[in-house]
Amino acid sequence: MFTHAIARQPGANFDLGLTTADLGPPSYSLILNQHRAYIQALAELGLEVILLEDEPDYPDAYFVEDTAIVTPHVAVITRPGAPSRRGEEQKIEPLLRQFRPVVKIEAPGTLDGGDVMMAGNHFFIGSSLRTNLEGAAQLAEALKHYGHTAEVVPVDAGLHLKSSVNYLGDNRVLVTDALADYPGFAAYQRIILHPDEEYAANTLRVNDALLTPKGYPRTLEQLSHLGLRLIELDVSEVHKMDGGLTCMSLRF
């Protein structure tokens, strides 16, 4: 059960953040409304949400998930793969020290939280453009000290691992067709996304509910049979900036 979440307000210059998407210009007023609805959903699910002010020097800083991996026992402070984002993790570290002991990823390792999927006691770490093998190895070693296991998953499509797969709890993963045959997922019930709805892979399990992006009816139908509350959220402006539902909070 999650009891807390950390989130950060998008700044007025959020449109200067990194993106490879070609979905049109993002709207500041819209993203504020969408972010507000996201925070409200977390609060309604029983989480105490710590909402931080925007960081003008870091237009991507509202994607707080990339700055840390928070387990029941430890918080691992990352070293973001994009040079323009390095420093965001330093803004979040003092707050996390109030809740968990902290370890840090060190150079030359790079690690984004969006590349780390926790499935119970086991962690899948994406090797991507943002997370290198050294960063993955450092995380795996840190987790081992707290009784966790980990493995590295090559990320050949999408920005992060969790752009293509997310753990829904109850031994289930929501996964794109391209990643569905990864051997490490063979022990899980795989819910395979329709090719037209791959963005919906970034669905977030929070306690007894699933937060899922609005506008993906096939995925909604697939998820409707799981016995969990479904909350659809419009994240169109987040999508334009290569982000998703998991990216905008740290849950613990």
Image: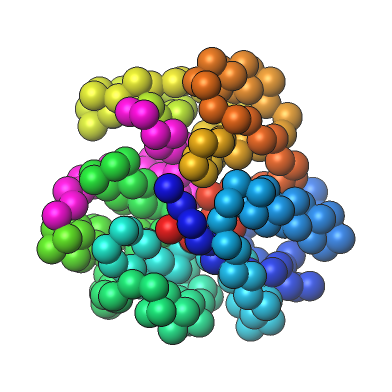
Decide whether residue 189 is among the magenta residues.
Answer: no
Name the residue: 86% across, 60% down.
29
Which residue is found at the position 28% from the left and 67% from the top?
Answer: 74
Position in image of residue 238 (x %, y %)? 68, 52
Identify the residue shown where x is 33% and y is 72%: 100
Tell me the quarter of the picture where residue 178 sits. Answer: top left
Viewer-proximal residue among 8 and 198: 8
Rendered image quadrant of residue 230? top right
- Residues shaded magenta: 147-171
* Residue 150 in view (yes/no): yes
Q: Residue at x 18, y 52 (%)?
A: 148
Pick the residue in front: 5 or 159: 5
| Location of residue 94 in the rendering, given as x and y in whole percent from the top left corner | 44, 84
Give the quarter of the image for residue 6. bottom right
Q: Is residue 211 left or right of residue 26?
A: left
Residue 179, x across and y down, in percent: 37, 29
